């Protein structure tokens, strides 16, 4: 069973080397581009929490359908912005 604590309760244990984790909802800004001559796509993911950018990572996917499935996006969902 997992024990759930506040940082006040567990901070000294973390200082002593114990591993602890937490979960927070983050925002993912994803930029996609199809690779030339292929169905594979390259996605750049900017993960942020509030005003803070947490990390940027890049990953290739087999096709756009795989990316839509991973992010649970319906192909009719109007969420896409196009850069001119």
Image (cartoon, rainbow, N blue to C red):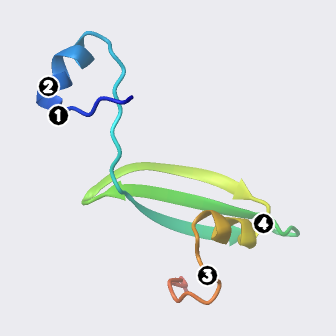
Task: Name the residue nearer the viewer: 75 or 42.
Answer: 75
Q: Earlier in the sequence, mark 4 or mark 1?
A: 1
Q: How crowded is mark 3: few (under 14 residues within 10 Å), some or many (20 or more)?
A: few
Q: Quadrant of the C terminus?
A: bottom right
Can you identify the residue that label 3 sits on? Answer: 74
Name the residue carrying label 4.
35
Q: In the image, is residue 27 above or below residue 59? A: below
Q: Closer to the camera, 50 or 38?
A: 50
Judge whether 39 appears above or below 77 on screen: above
- Across and down, in percent, residue 68 comes to 65, 71
Q: Distance between the residues labelled 3 and 4?
A: 22 Å
Disc 3 and disc 1: Cα gap in Å? Answer: 37 Å
In-image side of 45 versus 33 (left or right): left
Instruction: State the mark number for residue 42.
Output: none
Residue at (86% x, 67% y) in the render = 38
Residue 37 location (% of width, % of height): 88, 69
Q: Are the residues at dot 2 and dot 1 in contact (C-beta closer than 8 Å)?
A: yes
**Looking at the rendering, which quadrant does residue 60 occupy?**
bottom right
Identify the residue position indicated by label 1 in the image. 6
Disc 2: CA contacts within 10 A as few (<14), some (14-19) or many (>=20): few
């Amino acid at each position: 069973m997992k024990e759930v604590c506040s940082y006040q309760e567990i901070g000294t244990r973390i200082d002593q080397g114990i591993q602890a984790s937490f979960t927070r909802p983050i925002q993912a800004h994803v930029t996609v581009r199809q690779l030339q001559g292929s169905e594979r796509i390259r996605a750049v993911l900017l993960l942020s929490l509030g005003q803070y950018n947490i990390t940027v990572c890049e990953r290739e996917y087999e096709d756009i359908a795989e990316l839509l499935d991973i992010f649970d996006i319906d192909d009719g969902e109007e969420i896409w912005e196009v850069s001119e």
